[in-house]
Amino acid sequence: MSRLSELASIVGHQHVVSGEELYSRPQDFWNSTPTVALGLVKPGNVEEVSAILALCDRHAQPVVIEGGRTNLVHATQATGETVLMSLERMNAILSLDTDDMTAEVEAGVILETLQAAVQQKGLRFGLDLGARGSATIGGVLATNAGGFQALRYGVARDQVLGLECVLANGKVLSHLVPYVKDNTGYDLKQLFIGSEGTLGAITRAMLRLHPSPQSVNTALLAFENFGAVVGALNTMKRALRGELSSFEIMWREFYDFNVGALCPHAPPLPTGHPFYVLCETEGFDSEADEAQFEAVMADLLENGGAADIVLAQSSRQRSDFWRIREEFGPEMDLFKVMVDFDVSLPISKMDTFVQETEALLAREVPENLGLHVIGHLGDGNLHIATGLPTPERKLDVQRLIYGLVRRHGGSISAEHGVGLAKKDFLNHSRTPEEIATMRAIKAALDPRNILNPGKIL
């Protein structure tokens, strides 16, 4: 019996896709290369996931677990001998508890679907990102996604109270507790969050929720120097009573380019300033929150912290502001061979890092097509992109930029994971002892190396 036939005996023939059929599908959202795999299996429950992995473990059959396929580090790239496993059929929101403020969900639930469901109950799930319409809960947990509101709510791992996971040998670990305090030995769920499917398959999660804010205030600010940006961030943290949820920075080249592509005749703020910030607060008293927000913005403008400010006067204008930050279509058209980075740095070193990056690229890779820098400044995360006319020097650019990250004590991956794209640079952010410990954990949980082999390590 062929491997796909064995898998079909577990899930049904209608839930197995052959490698030939997959070849017409792009590898992921960012990569138009055809999908190469032995086949794709779609289990419908944890028992089927367990049976699939037990079968694959017995035969040393490599397995890659897919989520929404919007990862940026080739974390789901497979080979012709690999079985892909999608949990898209496991997409139930099993419970929403308004007293405990928790949600129990299967791993295939789409992030935006969960956001909408909890909103109807007057609650908020504290994670949001651009791929909300396709990213699955299992995927965002497996990659420990960050997003736009980490400043207030934390990253993906901060939303998790308990997990159900299936190990490589098919054994199920289930600890779906609905409370925060659980000091009963090793916190095993943390092994799987951020492991990119290399240690086990996340099948279910107990997630913490928050009261849904009743007010939103949004502003776009321009600054003449980086010190003023940092000063504004600290002022807002103090003056806005803990309501600051987003503080997104854009360097001039990115802002000017995206405004020129998206709204050239009516930019919300004039181009040409060195720095722009999109900030947002969420609160529970509409009138008081708006008054406080406007007072803080007026103080920043009057006392020299900000060069210019515009406040969103409607939900449409708010969406227009966020579109400048979130829309990457024009950038992808400009940077045909894109080299992008997702790094963490101490805020105090960011401006120097960007200046050194500009100088380094100008000197070492003068054929580069520009440098776009944006980021979640409040949690120390920068996204950097440049483009090349041809792909030959892509590795040179990576070595230069990751070398700078290492010199400044940063992380080569803030929120996108490691996958294949960054694994050769893992030693820039982790010590040999840490990497050896990671290898030991991998060997203990997946001794046959069937789960997403070759990723991270």
Image (cartoon, helix red, strand yellow):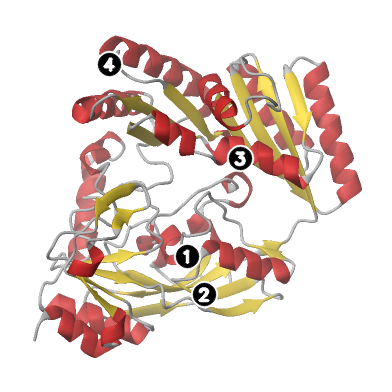
Q: Which mark is residue 137?
A: 1
Give the percent coordinates (x, y) of residue 206.
52, 72
Q: Pick whichever of labels 4 and 1 is earlier in the sequence.
A: 1
Q: Please give the count of numbered marks on the rendered protein.
A: 4
Which quadrant of the figure has residue 393? top left
- At horizontal 57% and vertical 25% (from top left) the residue drawn is 260
Q: Pick whichever of labels 2 and 1 is earlier in the sequence.
A: 2
As drawn, is 14 to the left or to the right of 36? right
In the picture, which quadrant includes the N terminus?
bottom left
Q: Secondary structure at mark 4?
A: loop
Q: Which mark is residue 323?
A: 3
Q: Pick whichever of labels 4 and 2 is earlier in the sequence.
A: 2
Camera-side residue of 212 and 444: 212
Task: Name which residue type carries label 1.
Answer: Ile
List the residue tagged with mark 2: 105
Q: CA distance from mark 4 to mark 1?
A: 39 Å
Please tell me how crowded label 4 is: few (under 14), some (14-19), or many (20+) other residues with Cα within 10 Å: some
Task: Name which residue type carries label 3.
Answer: Arg
Q: CA distance from mark 4 to mark 3?
A: 30 Å
Q: Secondary structure at mark 3?
A: helix
Q: CA distance from mark 3 to mark 2?
A: 30 Å
As drawn, is 150 to the left or to the right of 363? right
Q: CA distance from mark 4 to mark 2?
A: 47 Å
Task: Name which residue type carries label 2.
Answer: Val
Please tell me how crowded label 1 is: few (under 14), some (14-19), or many (20+) other residues with Cα within 10 Å: many
Q: Which mark is residue 365?
A: 4
Q: Pick whichever of labels 3 and 1 is earlier in the sequence.
A: 1
